[in-house]
Image: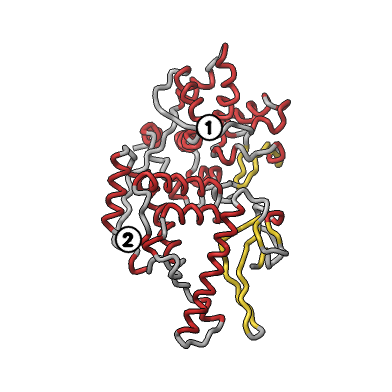
């Protein structure tokens, strides 16, 4: 086992654990997919330490090593010449872990835990694993088939899941199946997704109309509802700037800079790693900057919020107080920002830059939402 072979940690401060193979003066390295902080690895003993799931990860690392050793042993038995290139070939599952005995849920949780994916992605994968556990907890990779997938799809439909939510869970399951193929639990030709098409429905964005935003702006909170003021201001701030929840809670006052006579919010998106620059003294008449000035005494405290799920529950209460009947979440602030900017005549490419979209097609999804946008565009034309 070799940790941080390149002596360089990633943006998360973690480095990869690899398996080193040595033969006749040459070396080859095999990724385990496990990323750790330097303090979580004992070099002398080649063990994970100080990690909340150290025992599970150590067991997983040993399984990775055993698979390579099993491949070497099988080659000897078959009279093959053992070399590093042989080990680099996709490893077959060892007899101790045939596909018929590998639990999708159990093995899936191990992979998610050892993954270097973003925390939000790991949470989403675990949510899918929770559903798989309630669907058929004893299912193994050998059980997977086209019929199994259609049964799981029907199970989600019976739980009143939307078409796109079902598609999201099936995509998560496909990630796990691809991982099983890489580990040799099932051959690629047996993948149940080869003939299965994941169905997507039309995306409908939840957003607030200008008059609904105005209701929230004018909402006066009294009594016990005063405690909701911070949530309300954070939501409105994101309506004016287009920030996601994940980006908002990562902000610091250091992200506010003055340049060229304007005040900018400059940050790199947690989701896409794309840098965004928002002129908060210009956009929506500087309302975002005005809110920020209210919280000067709190320093970075303005950007501290409860969990996203908790915030969404509190927003339901704020919507009721403002007389807004539609259901909206914190992410609706981002959709509101894009929709209103396009409605007010902002160029689609400008909105793309402000939102940090890699592809303008993503931004164009907002241009058809508000019927009034079409009316305003036609009013500008001389027919």
Quadrant where the N terminus sits is bottom right
Name the residue rendered at 36%, 62% in the picture.
100
Q: Position of residue 299 (x, y in %)?
A: 72, 31
Q: Is residue 380 visible?
A: no
* Cα–Cα span, label 1 and label 2: 42 Å
**Badge 1: how crowded within 10 Å, few (<14), some, or many (20+)?**
many
The nearer-to-camera label among 1 and 2 is: 2
Q: Which residue, given by chain and number where applicable, does mark 2 sit on?
A: 192
Q: Position of residue 274 (x, y in %)?
A: 58, 50
9 or 40, which lies in front?
Answer: 40
Q: Would you say 193 lies left or right of 262 here?
A: left
Way the structure is coloured: secondary structure
Q: Is residue 54 above or below residue 100?
A: above
Q: Is residue 191 above or below residue 221?
A: below
Helix or strand or loop: what does disc 2 sit on?
loop
Helix or strand or loop: what does disc 1 sit on?
helix
Q: Would you say 277 lies left or right of 327 here?
A: right
Q: Is residue 47 above or below residue 342?
A: below
Q: Are marks 1 and 2 in contact (CB under 8 Å)?
A: no
Give the number of the disc on residue 239: 1
Q: Earlier in the sequence, mark 1 or mark 2?
A: 2
Displayed quadrant of residue 127: top left
Q: Which residue is situated farthest in the front direction here?
A: 96
Q: Position of residue 113 (x, y in %)?
A: 54, 52
Q: Is residue 288 above or below residue 217?
A: below
**Badge 2: how crowded within 10 Å, few (<14), some, or many (20+)?**
some
């Amino acid at each position: 086992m070799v940790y941080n072979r390149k002596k360089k940690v990633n943006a998360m401060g973690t480095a990869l654990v690899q398996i080193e193979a040595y033969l006749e003066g040459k070396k080859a390295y095999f990724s385990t997919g496990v990323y750790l902080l330097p303090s979580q690895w004992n070099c002398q003993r080649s063990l994970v330490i100080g990690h909340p799931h150290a025992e599970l990860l150590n067991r997983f690392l040993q399984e990775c090593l055993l698979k390579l050793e099993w491949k070497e042993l099988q080659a000897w038995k078959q009279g093959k010449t053992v070399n590093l290139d042989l080990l680099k070939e996709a490893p077959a599952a060892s007899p101790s872990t045939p596909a018929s005995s590998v639990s999708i849920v159990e093995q899936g949780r191990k992979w998610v835990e050892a993954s270097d994916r973003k925390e939000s992605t790991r949470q989403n994968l675990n949510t899918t694993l929770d559903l798989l556990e309630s669907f058929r907890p004893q299912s193994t990779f050998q059980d997977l088939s086209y019929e199994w997938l259609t049964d799981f799809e029907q199970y989600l439909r019976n739980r009143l899941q939307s078409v796109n939510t079902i598609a999201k869970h099936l995509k998560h399951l496909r990630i796990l199946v691809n991982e099983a193929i890489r580990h040799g639990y099932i051959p690629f030709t047996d993948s149940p997704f080869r003939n299965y098409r994941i169905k997507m429905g039309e995306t409908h964005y939840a957003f607030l109309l200008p008059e609904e935003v105005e209701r929230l702006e004018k909402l006066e909170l009294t009594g016990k509802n005063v405690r909701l003021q911070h949530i309300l201001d954070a939501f409105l701030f994101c309506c004016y700037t287009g920030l996601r929840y994940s980006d908002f809670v990562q902000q610091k006052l250091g992200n506010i800079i003055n340049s060229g006579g304007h005040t900018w919010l400059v940050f790199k998106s947690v989701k896409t790693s794309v840098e965004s620059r928002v002129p908060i003294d210009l956009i929506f008449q500087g309302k975002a900057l005005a809110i920020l000035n209210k919280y000067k005494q709190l320093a970075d405290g303005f950007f501290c919020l409860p969990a996203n799920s908790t915030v969404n529950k509190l927003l339901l209460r704020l919507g009721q107080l403002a007389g807004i009947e539609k259901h909206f979440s914190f992410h609706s602030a981002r959709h509101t920002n894009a929709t209103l900017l396009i409605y007010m005549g902002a160029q689609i490419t400008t909105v793309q830059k402000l939102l940090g979209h890699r592809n303008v097609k993503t931004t164009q999804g907002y241009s058809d939402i508000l019927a009034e946008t079409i009316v305003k565009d036609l009013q500008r034309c001389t027919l």
